[in-house]
Image (cartoon, grey):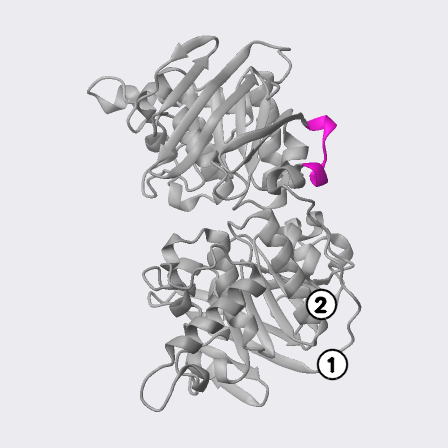
Amino acid sequence: MSRLPNEKQIALELCGIDKKFGAVHANSNIDLQVPAGTIHGIIGENGAGKSTLMNIIYGFYTADSGEIKISGTTRKLNSSKEAISYGIGMVHQHFMLVDNFSVLENVILGAESGGLLQPSLKKARTELERLAKEYQLDVPLDALIEDLPVGLQQRVEILKALYRGAKILILDEPTGVLTPQETDHLFKIFDALREQGVTILLITHKLREILAATDNVSVMRQGAMVAHRKTSETDKEELAELMVGRKVRLKVNKGDTKTEQVLLSTTDLTYLDEMGVERLKKVSMSIKAGEVVGIAGVSGNGQSELMSTLSGLISPSSGHINIGDKQIDAQHPSSADEVRQLGVGHIPEDRLVMGLIKSFTAEESAILGYQNSAIYNGVVLNKPKMINQECVRLMEEWDVRPRDPKLRSSLFSGGNQQKLIIAREVDKNPDLLLIGQPTRGVDIGAIELIHKRIVELRDKGKGILLVSVELDEILALSDRIIVMFDGKVVGEVSAEQANEKVLGMMMANIMPDHLKSSTQVNQGEQL
């Protein structure tokens, strides 16, 4: 395997890193060179070994064999404390912050100097003000973490690492909860860090971001490092093929659809949670046959509650839902089973919490929610042979691997769990399909298949509600896009009107000037 040109001092070098977990060869003879003061992307499908490799670099795992060199010196990294002492920091996908602590308190937590807290806080404040100015990481130091938006929380995590002296910074899927504008600002922060000599390892599945932000990119597949590229000398198509091992179609082809049949509508739909907090605020919308309606918004702005009310998992507090000629409201609630019988399928956002039961076999998860159907049951007992046969058929049609209906659900990869759930719902031929985060944590090859099947359903006249935090996915699949902020619908745009900039502004509750006069974007009105 050829290495990157030695144009600068090498900040991090891996030589023959190998790691096994039982029979699983997670990392196989990994070689990597990362020049100092560069942004280096690491990409690969789920299970390619990226996380294992990063955890070895950060000291969470110890390699079975191989060598790690930091600025040319071989180091043994047996803990994250040791990694930090050698100038390695890591910002995890799920932030490691204490919600009811201030920014300042979070930053010094575990790094206090001496037994007295006040001198540590004073010293930290001075240093953080310097770091914030130097790296464009402005954040209110006395604010509580729970009061900060996710973009600022992420800055706190970066400040924590820099405060501890990080010169090599690992970021794991850093843009998953950010708006496009916040992502753009994050990339500016990367540029500032790079200019000051900080080396960044960027782990992401978003090829567009790899191409926009990195100097070099390395590709992992099945535990091995299969390619290194200068970012300026590659493209999405090549990187996708290197990741999967075959050509991948990245563009979704859609035909025109013309329909007026409304399958579902909501009027002033409102939901208060058990604490009395208003999570949905007079949401009015509709879904027609033969269209994909995308719901865009930063995670936590009411999308999950909308999906749960529409699928019958929770009941509206006020307003109503119409599915065909059936009205659902606080006085006339419906269960998830009743909504399913109205021809509505539901692919939940969290596959492990709501989509399947980890201890069930694949064939049991493949009938979950439909276990009382006549096809699976005799007069007294269920039909195990039929259940098995149906699971095998779905696995073949959707390329679920391994094709073992008796395998426990938890032992499948995330992408294969997702394909099994989608196969289960699509196979029942619903008129309307509610889809939450269909490709979250899913390999690029599986994304290609899932997107193709969603478009096929739309072209067959099915109505689809698509909730996704992936703007590329929303833009590629949707005919209309509804944007939510703070539990409200703040606007709707057609696929032709939409782009990342427009949606990003709306997701931040800023209406683009050219849409302000449109009746489609009036908050709370029927769309």
Q: Residue 91, how many percent across, how many down?
A: 44, 33
Is residue 394 depicted above or below 300 in this figure? Answer: below
Near mark 1 (Cα within 10 A), the count class, few <14, some 14-19 or many ≥20, is few
| Mark number, residue 520 | 2
Q: Residue 217, how many percent across, how many down?
A: 61, 28
Near mark 2 (Cα within 10 A), the count class, few <14, some 14-19 or many ≥20, is some
Asked whether 417 or 154 is in front, the reply is: 417
Residue 163, quarter of the rendered image: top left
> Is 359 situated left or right of 261 in this image?
left
Q: Which residues are magenta?
A: 231-238
Please identify, in this view, whether the residue under mark 2 or under mark 1 is nearer the observer. 1
Q: Earlier in the sequence, mark 2 or mark 1?
A: 1
Asked whether 503 or 356 is in front, the reply is: 356
Please name the amino acid that badge 1 sits on.
Answer: Glu
Query: Which quadrant: the C terminus?
Result: bottom right
The residue drawn where x is 41% and y is 10% is: 74
Q: Residue 515, how many percent across, how many down?
A: 75, 58
**Residue identifier under label 1:** 260
Q: What secondary structure is found at the residue carrying circle 1?
A: loop
Please name the amino acid that badge 2 sits on.
Answer: Gln
Regarding residue 91, the answer to whether it shows in the image is no
Q: Main secondary structure of the magenta part?
A: helix
The residue drawn where x is 40% and y is 78% is: 371
Q: What secondary structure is found at the residue carrying circle 2?
A: helix
For the image, the number of numbered tags is 2
